């Protein structure tokens, strides 16, 4: 199992809602799951905490890369990006 950490500072809650309605199915296409998600609390450091964060699990690095690079999911990734400032970090 490999993990990705997603952070989002929300600007548009309606767009975020549209993303959330499609996100789990998009993850599942590449064997991904949401391990944990919710409001974020900064424990250490000077950077502002994102509004929400998620830990995503994938079977392997190739599956995570396939998910983020899948052209058939471009509209779903665009919803996430359009809802605010988004970062997805692969932990590997």
Image (spheres, helix red, strand yellow):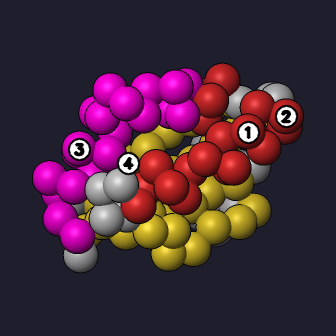
Sequence-wise first label, 4 or 3 = 3
Q: Is residue 48 visible?
A: no
Specify the label residue 14 is tagged with: 2
Residue name at image x 42 percent, y 34 percent: 73
Nearest to the eye among marks 4 and 3: give it.
3
Which x, y percent locates residue 32?
Answer: 37, 63
- Tell me the residue that label 4 is attached to: 89
Q: Pinpoint residue 81: horizontal percent, then vertical percent.
A: 59, 28
Would residue 30 appear left or right of 73 to someone viewing this image?
Answer: left
**Badge 4 density bin: few <14, some 14–19, many ≥20, Cα 10 Å:** few
Measured along the vertical axis of the image, is residue 33 above or below residue 75? below
Q: Magenta residues, as a range?
A: 59-78
Q: Are marks 2 and 1 in contact (CB under 8 Å)?
A: yes
- Please give the name of the residue rendered at 43% of the width and 55% of the height, measured from the top-left corner: 27
Mark earlier in primary sequence (4, 1):
1
Choose mark 4 or mark 2, whichever is in front.
2
Q: Earlier in the sequence, mark 3 or mark 1?
A: 1
């Amino acid at each position: 199992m490999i993990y990705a950490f997603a952070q989002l500072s929300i600007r548009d809650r309606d767009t975020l809602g549209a993303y959330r309605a499609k996100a789990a199915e998009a993850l599942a296409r590449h064997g991904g799951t949401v391990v944990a998600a919710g409001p974020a609390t900064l424990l250490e450091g000077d950077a502002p905490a994102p509004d929400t964060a998620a830990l995503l699990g994938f079977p392997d690095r190739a599956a995570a890369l396939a998910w983020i690079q899948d052209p058939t999911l471009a509209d779903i990734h665009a919803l996430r990006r359009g809802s605010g400032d988004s970062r997805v970090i692969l932990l590997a």
